[in-house]
Amino acid sequence: MFRVSTDLINIHSDCSPTDNGWTLPPMATACPNLSKIRSKIGLGVTIFHDESNCVWLYNRSSSDIFVNSITLNTLPSSGINGTKKSNHVVKVQPGHLIKAYDYQMALSIWSSQHSIDLELGSDGNGPSRVNLLNNGSFSFSFVKGFGNHYQRRDILECPCWLEVILDFVNK
């Protein structure tokens, strides 16, 4: 886990750009397919948080990225333990930006799924605003797509991917 305490971070391959950010760690074992994919990441992505608790993802690489988030999903499907799981993956081309996580939309989704008033907080039957902010997340893969329209159904089948876990409260 790599903790970030700023509103912006760049994630890139081992190309050593001059900007601040996080370089993907070296691979433990040499794998030609993974090396080829990692070489396409280049400048990678910029992730930034705005004043309305939205998190944006800008694709700085020369290849597509594929983003999955509950707030990108218009028709959620049932997931584990009756929760809703996003299965909608959005392809983001180089030089493009996407709102990867929208706090207000997540609040609305949680409220409708759990039939509770999140303004009142959690009484053990559902998440509070704080829990929703702490537990928001999205994931993305570099170069290779996943989801219903791809051979790889799950992000775990992709050779290079990251999960971003959001914690706005403890900033």
Image: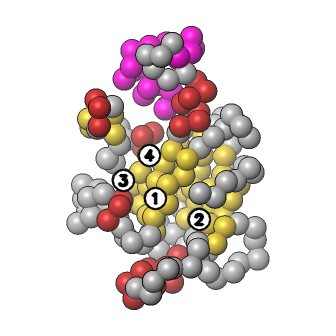
Give the percent coordinates (x, y) of residue 15: 64, 82
Task: Look at the image and tell me whether residue 75 can be seen.
Answer: no
Closer-to-camera residue (95/108): 108
Lateral position of residue 143 relative to residue 171, left or right: left
Query: Relative to 100, is 146 above or below?
Result: below
- Residue at the disc numbered 4: 69
Magenta: main secondary structure equals helix
Give the percent coordinates (x, y) of residue 103: 56, 34
Tag 3–tag 2 contact (CB < 8 Å): no
Residue reaching furthest front?
28
- Residue at the disc numbered 2: 45
Residue at 45 percent of width and 20 percent of height: 126
Amino acid of disc 1:
Phe
Q: Which numbered disc flags the more N-terminal residue, 4 or 1?
A: 4
Q: Which numbered disc flags the more N-terminal residue, 3 or 4?
A: 4
- Residue at the disc numbered 3: 89
Q: Which numbered disc flags the more N-terminal residue, 3 or 2?
A: 2
Q: Which stretch appears magenta? A: 106-122
Lateral position of residue 28 relative to residue 54, left or right: left
